[in-house]
């Protein structure tokens, strides 16, 4: 046998040995990945929570203060609720709003103008950090009384029910107890809202007996994540809708939790007036022939939303 043939066979043996070594490694990695995916497939609520917190936290931190859709208007309405203003008491030139301390007014105006300035000049190389160097550093909490007050309009948020802002109201109260300034209080509000609405959406995913991954996909839509991560009434509206839908699906198999459906149906209808259409879900809980026998539970679930939602609009 030629010496060259011996070398080629030796190299072939080495190559086959390396391939045999790599094959178990690849197989082990693929088996581990398959095991992880199979476990996650059976836990859609956990997958949703992890993804929601990952993307939502990034949005809450990256988006500058008051740069969410109508975020300043939502903040003013939330702030009025923390001061006990259930109904819009102030009105100037036909516009409902709230009188805020001059110090807070200065901060809100700064961030409002900073966002507009950044949007106009970012293509020219303007950085938001450069604008923040001009930020007036105030002292005190949001509820500290100033020497004068300034009027700021709600700009359409006066019609929103407090149930749409419940987590944010709690966050403002905590922020004031901790003595946080406006930017940190706003960030706390975003995180508390993200945590609350993520938890409720995960509860809906866990509760529904079917279409769990469809619930995950709906809750992970870009607009859904964004509305959970900034100040908005839409985050509550979507979350409450998911919960009442999951409860209705569950009630088809097990006709129970009438009080729970009544509670979440009412919250869903109050979060935004168009949400009142969700009362129709109660009709699918039982057969049409059973409506006469179950009219009391139907009234208990649907009546509070039907009554309270229209009553809030003229307010």
Image (tube, helix red, strand yellow):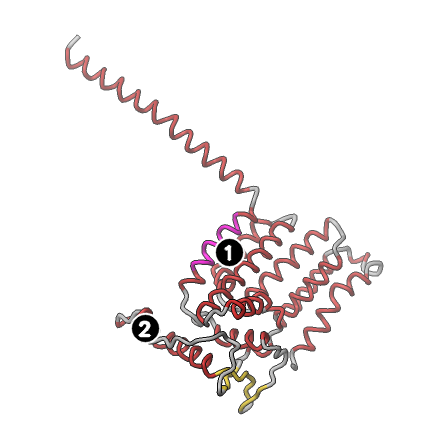
Q: Earlier along the polypeptide chain: callout 2 or callout 1?
A: 2
Residue at 58% of width from left, 74% of height from top? 82
| Residue 4 position (above or below residue 32) | above
Q: Quick one: SS at disc 2?
A: loop
Q: Is residue 183 left or right of residue 238?
A: left
Q: Is residue 262 left or right of residue 225?
A: right
| Residue 223 position (above or below residue 140) | above
Residue at 60% of width from left, 67% of height from top? 166
Residue 237 position within the rendered picture, expressed as x and y whole percent measured from the top left: 59, 65
Work out whether residue 273 or residue 230 is closer to the camera in this orientation and state it: 230
Most extreme residue toward the right is 293
Report the residue marked by disc 2: 133
Mark 2 → mark 1, Cα distance in angstroms: 35 Å
Most extreme residue toward the bottom is 93
Is 49 colored magenta in this rendering? yes
Q: Which mark is residue 172?
A: none
Numbered disc total: 2
| Residue 6 position (above or below residue 132) | above
Most extreme residue toward the left is 3
Q: Quick one: SS at disc 1?
A: loop
| Residue 241 position (above or below residue 6) | below
- Where the C terminus falls, by quadrant? bottom right
Work out whether residue 186 or residue 141 is closer to the camera in this orientation and state it: 141
Residue 207 position within the rendered picture, expressed as x and y whole percent measured from the top left: 65, 51
Most extreme residue toward the top is 1
Work out whether residue 100 or residue 162 is closer to the camera in this orientation and state it: 100
Dot 2 surroundings within 10 Å: few (below 14), some, or many (20 or more)?
few
Q: Range of the magenta residues?
A: 47-58
Residue at 46% of width from left, 83% of height from top? 102
Residue 114 position within the rendered picture, expressed as x and y whole percent measured from the top left: 37, 76
Task: Point out the frontmost of discs 2 and 1.
Answer: 2
Report the residue marked by disc 1: 220
């Amino acid at each position: 046998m030629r010496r060259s043939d011996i070398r080629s066979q030796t190299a072939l043996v080495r190559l086959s040995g390396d391939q045999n070594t790599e094959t178990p490694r690849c197989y082990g990695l693929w088996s581990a990945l398959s095991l992880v995916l199979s476990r996650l497939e059976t836990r859609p609520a956990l997958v949703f929570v992890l993804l929601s917190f990952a993307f939502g936290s990034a949005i809450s931190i990256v988006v500058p203060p008051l740069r969410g859709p109508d975020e300043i208007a939502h903040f003013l309405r939330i702030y009025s609720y923390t001061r006990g203003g259930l109904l819009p008491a102030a009105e100037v030139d036909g516009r409902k709003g709230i009188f805020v301390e001059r110090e807070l007014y200065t901060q809100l105006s700064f961030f409002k103008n900073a966002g507009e300035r950044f949007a106009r000049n970012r293509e020219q190389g303007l950085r938001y950090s450069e604008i923040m160097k001009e930020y007036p550093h105030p002292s005190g909490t949001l509820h500290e009384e100033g020497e004068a007050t300034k009027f700021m309009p709600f700009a359409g948020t006066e019609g929103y029910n407090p149930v749409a802002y419940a987590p944010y109201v709690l966050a403002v109260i905590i922020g004031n107890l901790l003595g946080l300034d406006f930017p940190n209080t706003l960030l706390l509000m975003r995180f508390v809202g993200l945590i609350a609405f993520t938890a409720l959406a995960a509860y809906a995913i866990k509760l529904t007996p079917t279409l769990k991954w469809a619930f995950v996909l709906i809750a992970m839509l870009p607009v859904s994540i964004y509305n959970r991560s900034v100040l908005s009434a839409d985050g509550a509206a979507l979350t409450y809708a998911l919960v009442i839908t999951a409860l209705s699906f569950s009630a088809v198999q097990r006709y129970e939790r009438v009080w729970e459906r009544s509670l979440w149906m009412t919250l869903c209808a109050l979060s935004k007036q168009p949400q009142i259409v969700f009362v129709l879900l109660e009709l699918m809980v039982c057969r049409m022939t059973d409506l006469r026998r179950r009219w009391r539970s139907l009234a208990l679930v649907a009546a509070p939303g039907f009554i309270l939602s229209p009553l809030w609009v003229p307010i």
